[in-house]
Image (cartoon, grey):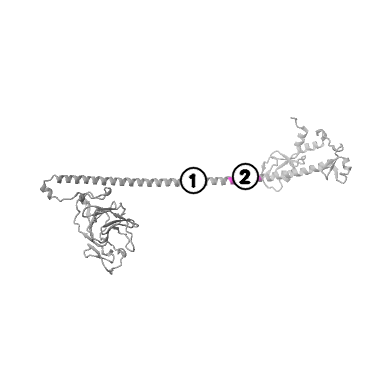
């Protein structure tokens, strides 16, 4: 690569970087850079602090510069030297049309021309000036443009950088805020899911405990029933071994009486002392005005006229029903009734809270467990839309109602034969009082004591 012209390098060091001309009254800043006194004064015009060096951008708190006399003397000496020795040979520009030197400049067409072109028809009316004068004029214009560009660079560039930096910082701040928001939302979601998992697992654990509890209760009850059957079998075998005279003196009881149908091995009490014969009486305050309760409250019949009775909240006003005075909240109980042949009647139990006013749905969902008797036909009142017909060997006149409160069992038996009439699925009484319920002509059978070990 050809080395640069030393003369040009020397002259470049003598030029102001603002006006690009020889230094005029050069001054030196604290950073070591030199400028014309007028140039640096104009660059710092209007500033009271943060004075920037136009070349290296170093900032000064005070307006401080010193005259550079040595540089000024060098500039003056260089001006006096013959510039020809520092100039490289210039190629003379010639007119391509006339092959003459282009000495003048046509301002209309903005191009160098020779004197022949100037005198020709094409340029005769145009304004022409010497080419050196035009070049000097363009240099002045260029110097002004360069000066303006330097000023714009000096004042605008820092502001643009600062503004862009502010925008970038703002965007970074918003980005960090959104990031923290997303992280926080996912943390809350994760915490919510963990809490839901904990609750569901706890519910499953409680359900498992309840299942195990009921399983253990069922196994215990089944074991108790099996033990009772074993004792009963041994007792019967011992009685069969007795002499004839003693055997005939023993109270006879059939297998049907001693072993009552027990669906699911749950209905039949295993010991006679755990079963209570309930002395049920009728509650006249609950009886429908068409029903007539006997003085001893042991029977009820349907009257022909509406009785003038108090309209108290306990009384049935639409359905021909009456409740028993007794209520049960625990234990095993039974009572027997005798229905009038050929009459329609309803026998069962009801919750204390059963509705007394208006039409009533006779089904467990409404708090009633009962059977319907009509002549020789029986139905279980299991749902409001359907009656479940019962298939029986014979239509019993005496009905035994069996209530086992804890497991929620309600069952009906033929009091004469011990045959099961119907057993409702286990219910949950939830601590509420359960009372006998009747409808139609009925008579209570006195029960002084439990009938046998499996009444």
The verdict on residue 169 being magenta is: yes
Q: Quadrant of residue 364?
A: bottom left
Which residue is pictured at 68% across the width and 46% down the height?
156
Residue 312 got which mark? Answer: none
The percent coordinates of residue 42 (x first, y second) are 73, 46
Which residue is pictured at 33% across the width and 46% down the height?
211
**Which residue in the protein does label 1 denote?**
186
Tell me the SS state at disc 2: helix
Task: Examine the residues drawn in magenta and state their main secondary structure.
Answer: helix
Q: Nearer the viewer, mark 2 or mark 1?
A: 1
Q: How many marks?
A: 2
Height in image: 443 above or below 109? below
The magenta-colored residue range is 160-171
Is 362 left, or right, of 88 in this rendering? Answer: left
The percent coordinates of residue 175 (x first, y second) are 56, 45
Which residue is pictured at 21% across the width and 46% down the height?
229
For the residue pair 425 and 90, the one nearer the viewer reads as 425
For the residue pair 433 and 64, the one nearer the viewer reads as 433
Residue 165 got which mark? Answer: 2
**Residue 35 visible to the viewer:** yes
Is 252 left, or right, of 5 in this rendering? Answer: left
Height in image: 441 above or below 428? below
């Amino acid at each position: 690569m050809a080395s640069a012209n030393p003369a040009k390098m020397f002259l470049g060091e003598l030029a102001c970087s603002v006006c690009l001309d020889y230094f005029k009254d050069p001054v030196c800043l604290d950073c070591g850079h030199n400028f014309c006194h007028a140039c640096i004064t104009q660059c710092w015009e209007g500033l009271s602090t943060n004075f920037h060096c136009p070349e290296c951008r170093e900032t000064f708190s005070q307006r401080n510069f010193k005259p550079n006399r040595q540089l000024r003397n060098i500039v003056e000496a260089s001006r006096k030297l013959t510039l020809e020795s520092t100039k490289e040979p210039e190629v003379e520009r010639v007119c391509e049309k006339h092959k003459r030197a282009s000495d003048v400049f046509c301002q209309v067409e903005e191009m160098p021309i020779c004197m022949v072109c100037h005198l020709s028809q094409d340029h005769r009316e145009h304004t022409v000036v010497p080419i050196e004068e035009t070049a000097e004029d363009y240099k002045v214009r260029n110097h002004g443009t360069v000066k303006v560009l330097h000023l714009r660079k000096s004042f605008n560039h820092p502001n643009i950088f600062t503004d862009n930096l502010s925008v970038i910082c703002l965007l970074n701040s918003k980005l960090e805020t959104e990031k923290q928001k997303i992280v926080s939302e996912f943390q809350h979601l994760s915490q919510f899911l963990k809490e839901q998992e904990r609750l569901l697992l706890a519910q499953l654990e409680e359900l498992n405990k309840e299942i195990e509890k009921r399983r253990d209760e069922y196994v215990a009850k089944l074991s108790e029933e099996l033990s009772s059957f074993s004792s009963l079998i041994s007792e019967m075998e011992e009685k069969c071994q007795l002499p004839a005279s003693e055997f005939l003196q023993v109270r006879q009881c059939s297998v049907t009486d001693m072993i009552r149908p027990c669906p699911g091995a749950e209905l039949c009490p295993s010991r006679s002392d755990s079963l209570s014969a309930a002395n049920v009486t009728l509650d006249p305050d609950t009886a429908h005005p068409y029903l007539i309760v006997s003085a001893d409250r042991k029977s009820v019949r349907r009257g022909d006229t509406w009785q003038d009775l108090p309209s108290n909240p306990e009384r049935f006003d639409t359905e021909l029903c009456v409740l028993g005075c007794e209520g049960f909240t625990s234990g095993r109980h039974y009572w027997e009734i005798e229905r009038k042949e050929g009459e329609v009647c309803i026998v069962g139990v009801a919750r204390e809270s059963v509705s007394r006013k208006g039409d009533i749905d006779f089904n467990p969902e409404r708090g009633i467990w009962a059977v319907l008797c009509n002549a020789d036909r029986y139905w279980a009142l299991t749902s409001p839309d359907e009656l479940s017909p019962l298939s029986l060997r014979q239509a019993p006149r005496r009905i035994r109602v069996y209530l086992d409160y804890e497991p929620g069992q309600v069952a009906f038996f033929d009091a004469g034969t011990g045959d099961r009439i119907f057993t409702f699925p286990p219910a949950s009484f939830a601590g509420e009082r359960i009372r006998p319920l009747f409808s139609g002509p009925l008579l209570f059978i006195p029960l002084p004591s439990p009938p046998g070990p499996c009444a």
